[in-house]
């Protein structure tokens, strides 16, 4: 049976009306679905000068000019009371916000425990306070990315248990460890962020799971709707592969495709060879095999489709993938 791309994903969906669902359940769905969330490690001072340090994962950046971040010190789910970070911000209007890395995971988890308002959570978590340049609250020495911030607005998002309070802050100074930078880009493998998911789940960005993806080109792009029918209905190419192909300036002509490669080769035409080349990601050799198969009388479009898929999955080589598909479609008709 043939599936169109949209039919490849088939979920049985639950429908959740938050108004008729217990707050802790709504909270868990949000935590798991809006994830992974970056974690702000927020340092504040009370009016009496007591230091406070707390992680918040309802957190993000919202603009660069001026640089703005926001996080939500919510009302406690247990009794609806306000947290110390919220009260300190209302009283003293300043904080520092730092990135959380794997090296301080257990310390920031410890800092999230409900210590009384008069307890210094730097002392409890063993993290090191360091003087800020502009604001009064201390920075956290162990974090390689620190921001000094001034509260611009505290917007209450409700009055009940677990209601949020959106603290939006302007970043007035940044401190960045030199060794996490590639020029002006922070290298995710070197900063080693941890993030929050739902339940007790966390995520860690390592060199293995960080990847690069270029922004779409600024000129004309083919678009999903203009993919040829034989590409769109492929049972080999994934929905991601189709979007990679759609994100390309123009469908190549047959002449362009023919120029790709048509060398004679003594490659062995066998399934084992094709699968081995596929496993090692040698899509150039796969194409030679597919062409050799055609010359020997085997009109097998699958060999071209799979070659294109490997070019997309292993090298995001959209030029090669397009030409392979155009050529294969012509040669195996
Ligand atoms: C990783 C992590 C993320 C958290 N995110 C939030 C959050 O976004 N909002 C919130 O109100 N509490 C959050 N918490 C819970 C607070 O850290 C916790 O309630 C803390 O005791 C509040 O401290 P405070 O009263 O000193 O401000 C989080 C805890 C952890 C461990």
Image (spheres, rainbow, N blue to C red):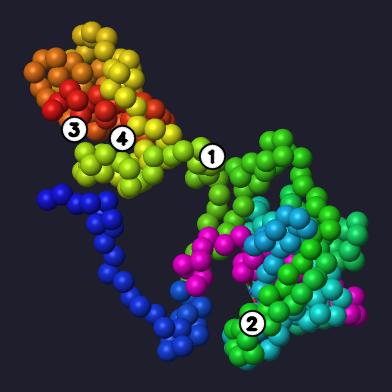
Q: Work out how far the residue at label 3 is from the one at label 4, CA to CA, in angstroms.
A: 10 Å
Report the residue at 80% width, 70% height from top: 151
Residue lying farthest to the left in this orientation:
297
Give coordinates of residue 247: x percent, y percent: 42, 40
Q: Work out how far the residue at label 1 is from the one at label 3, CA to CA, in angstroms.
A: 33 Å
Q: Earlier in the sequence, mark 1 or mark 4?
A: 1
Q: Earlier in the sequence, mark 3 or mark 2?
A: 2
Does any portion of residue 9 appear in the rendered image?
A: yes
Q: Is residue 52 left or right of residue 235?
A: right
Q: Which residues are magenta?
A: 30-59
Identify residue for label 4.
Answer: 309
Identify residue for label 3.
Answer: 302
User: Mark 2: is the Cβ under 8 angstroms from ligand 1?
Assistant: no
Label 4 CA crowd tier, 10 Å (few <14, some 14–19, many 20+): many
Identify residue for label 1.
Answer: 218
Number of callouts: 4
């Amino acid at each position: 049976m043939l599936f169109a791309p949209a039919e490849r994903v088939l979920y049985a969906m639950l429908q959740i009306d938050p108004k008729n669902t217990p707050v802790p359940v709504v909270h868990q769905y949000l935590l798991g679905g809006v994830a992974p969330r970056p974690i702000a490690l927020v340092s504040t001072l009370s009016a009496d000068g007591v230091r406070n340090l707390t992680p918040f994962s309802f957190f993000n950046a919202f603009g660069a000019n001026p640089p703005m971040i926001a996080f939500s010190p919510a009302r406690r789910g247990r009794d609806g009371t306000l947290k110390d970070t919220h009260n300190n911000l209302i009283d003293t209007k300043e904080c520092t916000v730092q990135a959380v890395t794997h090296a301080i995971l257990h310390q920031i988890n410890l800092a999230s425990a409900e210590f009384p308002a008069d307890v210094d959570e730097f002392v409890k978590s063993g993290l090191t306070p360091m003087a800020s340049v502009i604001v009064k609250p201390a920075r956290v020495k162990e974090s390689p990315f620190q921001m000094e911030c001034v509260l611009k607005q505290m917007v209450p998002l409700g009055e009940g248990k677990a209601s949020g309070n959106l603290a939006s802050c302007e970043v007035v100074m940044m401190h960045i460890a030199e060794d996490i930078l590639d020029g002006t880009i922070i290298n995710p493998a070197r900063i080693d962020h941890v993030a929050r998911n739902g339940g007790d789940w966390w995520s860690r960005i390592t060199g293995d799971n960080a990847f690069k993806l270029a922004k779409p080109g600024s000129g004309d792009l083919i678009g999903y709707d203009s993919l040829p029918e034989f590409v769109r209905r492929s049972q080999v190419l994934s929905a991601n592969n189709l979007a990679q192909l759609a994100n390309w300036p123009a469908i190549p002509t047959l002449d362009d495709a023919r120029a790709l490669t048509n060398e004679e080769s003594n490659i062995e035409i066998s399934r084992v060879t094709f699968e081995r080349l596929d496993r090692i990601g040698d899509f150039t050799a796969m194409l030679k095999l597919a062409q050799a198969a055609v010359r020997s009388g085997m009109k097998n479009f699958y060999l071209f489709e799979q070659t294109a898929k490997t070019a997309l999955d292993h090298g995001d080589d959209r030029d090669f993938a397009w030409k392979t598909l155009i050529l294969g479609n012509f040669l195996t008709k």
